[in-house]
Amino acid sequence: MNRRPGLSARLKLTISYAGLVLLAGSVLLAVVWVFLLRYVPDSPQGLLGVAPNRYLLVRVFAPAAATALAFLLVFGLLGGWILAGRMLAPLTRVADAARMAANGSLSHRIRMEGAKDEFRELADVFDTMLEQLESHVTEQQRFAANASHELRTPLAISQTLLDVARKDPARDQGELIERLHTVNTRAIDLTEALLLLSRGDRRSFIREPVDLSLIAEEATETLLPLAEQRQITLEVTGETTQTVGSAALLTRMVTNLVQNAIVHNLPAGGTVTVHVESQHDGSVLRVENTGHPLPPALVPTLTEPFQRGTERIRAGEHAGVGLGLAIVHSIVRAHDGTLDLTPRPAGGLLVTIRLPGTPQASAPSGAHYVY
């Protein structure tokens, strides 16, 4: 933004300091005149033959007063310039850091020393902002690189299949079409997941009352064939629970959690428990599954995009694109909720989601379904 040139803050403070010092000196001289010189007699008669009349005192006092005021003015300007420079030095450091951040350097930190005051609080807030901004930019760059890699893989496979078919016209066309269909489906799923993740991060949705327990039942019924195929028992418990948000996004959140719990389970005979309840003016969703033990160091990385977990078992067409829990995390954040992942000692994972509730909570229904 183009602005007209003006006085610097340091110069303004210097003038203000000098003006205050000069004003204080003038007030003192006025006090001397009002309460002292005005009562000195103007007659030639004085004490012990000495005649200190008002006229002589004023002639002697006026030059000294003018000299004192001039000294106070110079002292105020020099002292004000030095003090203003010292006071504004923290702002200069903040401005330098902001200028470096504007040029793309987000790793610089002010780290201002000393006791806490307004300037140091401003510097600490600015450092925190830079840290969060750097983390966000790094995360976005890593996400873009991973997304490009993931999208490039199905396209490269498609290109390879087409090249092979072109060089070998006698190759089975049905097998080629089936493989291309599989690869294209994966690319479409990945693209939709990326769009959904972006939508959740932007919070571009209309908030409305949503029955979280009904969503849990619908998501479980939808994934029942997958659970039966893998010999997994699904159990839904809890009560009617209301929250506020996007029904479509919350449905995708619960579906991802249940599908993740089914896919990353025991080869056979496993269980998945979905529990919904109202708690402390909020809604709580718990999805717990059996499975292989998870290393504690692996759990915090499960919500990162394209982190599937090398220790988890996944196979078949439901292996996913590595965005399942990342999408869940994004949707939870967009709804001002919290997400907790806890590895079960016997194996598997416990996922706990807490969402804000509605002002009027529905009465418990005591629902319990086992599939």
Image (cartoon, grey):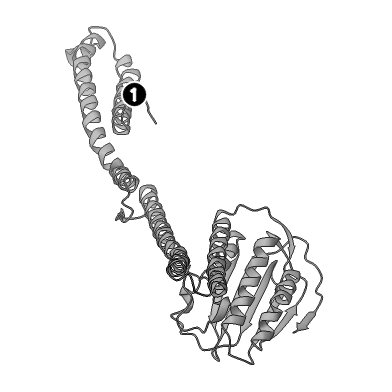
125 above or below 265?
above
Q: Position of residue 63 (x, y in %)?
A: 19, 15
Q: Position of residue 161 (x, y in %)?
A: 46, 69
Q: What element carries label 1?
A: helix
Quarter of the image with the C terminus in it: bottom right
- Splitting the image into 4 quarters, where does residue 272 fall? bottom right
Q: Which amino acid does label 1 sit on?
A: Val
227 above or below 17?
below
Rendered residue at 54%/82% (across/down)? 315
Q: Where is residue 50 in the image (x, y as percent from the top left)?
A: 17, 13
**Outermost residue toward the front in this view:** 170
Viewer-closest of 305 and 174: 174
Q: Say left or right for 97 vs 257.
A: left
Tally the marks: 1
Rendered residue at 33%/20% (across/down)? 30
Mark 1: few, some, or many residues within 10 Å (few <14, many ≥20)? few
Q: Say left or right for 125 vs 265.
A: left
Quarter of the image with the N terminus in it: top left
369 above or below 356?
below
Viewer-closest of 121 and 214: 214
Viewer-closest of 355 and 122: 355
Q: Say left or right for 279 vs 53.
A: right
- Splitting the image into 4 quarters, where does residue 70 fall? top left
159 above or below 66?
below
Question: In the rendered image, which residue does mark 1 sit on?
Answer: 27
Q: Position of residue 197 (x, y in %)?
A: 55, 61
Rendered residue at 39%/48% (across/down)? 118
Q: Say left or right for 155 vs 204.
A: left
